[in-house]
Amino acid sequence: MGTFYTLLVTVFFGILPISELRGAIPFAYFNGISLPIAAIVGGGANLLVFPLAIIFLTYFHSFFYSHFAWYIALFDKTVLKTRHKLSKKVALYGLLGITLFVAIPFPITGAYTGTLGSWILGLDMKKSFIAVSVGVLISTMIVTTILLVGESSYSLFIKNM
C-alpha cells in the first residue's frame, strides 16, 4: 500500500465514527507510517469531526429527521444513550466532563459522542469545540503511548533474528 493511500485511509478512519483516532493511528503505524506522522494525521482528522458534525446537525439533521423513519429511530436511540452517558459528567464537571469523556480512547467515547452530547445538552459550541479538541489531543497521546509501550514491551519478549 502506498504512503499517500495509507494516509488517505488514515484520514478516513480518523473521521469515521466507528474507528475515529483509535483505529486511524494504529492503521497508519502498522502500514509503515512513522508514529509521529500517524498521530498527527489520525488525530488531526479526528479534530475535523466537531465541525463536520455541527454542520450536519445544523443544516441537514432537520431534513433527515422529517423524511426518514430509519434516521428518526437511529437518532433517537443515539440521543438517549448519549444523554445518559454525558449528562451526569457535564452536571458534575461542566465542559471538563466532555473533555474527559472524549479523552478516554474506548469505543463510543470519541469526538462524535462528545460533539453530539454538547449539542443535545445545549452547551456553548465554541467552548464545546475546545473541550472536544482537548479530549481528542489527550486521546491521541494515549493511543500513541500505548502503541509505543506495546512495541517496546513486545521487543522485550521476542528476540529479533
Image (cartoon, rainbow, N blue to C red):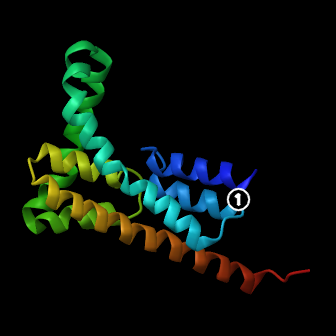
User: Taking 46 as reference, is 128 left or right?
Assistant: left
Above/below status of 11 relative to 66:
below
Mark 1 belongs to which amino acid?
Asn
* Residue at (19, 16) in percent of width and height: 66
- Name the spot of residue 70 as percent of width and height, x first: 32, 18
Q: Residue furthest bottom?
A: 156
Residue 101 higher or lower than 50, as above or below = below
Q: Quadrant of residue 29?
A: bottom right
Compared across the picture, whether 134 is left or right of 37 comes to left
Farthest residue, direction right: 161
Residue under label 1: 31
Q: In the image, 91: left or right of 129? A: left
Q: Secondary structure at mark 1?
A: loop
Residue located 59% across and 48% down the image: 8
Task: From the top left corner, tell me how far across and down residue 161 is, in percent.
Answer: 92, 80
Which residue is rendered at x = 40% and y = 67% of the image? 139
Residue 37 in picture, x, y percent from top left: 58, 68
Camera-nearest residue between 74 and 55: 55
The correct choice, above or below, for 7 with respect to 12 in the image is below
Please name the residue shown 52% across and 45% down the image: 12
Task: State which quadrant residue 24 falls in.
Answer: bottom right
Number of numbered tags placed on the structure image: 1
Residues 65 and 130: in front is 130
Whether 117 is drawn above or below 79: the answer is below
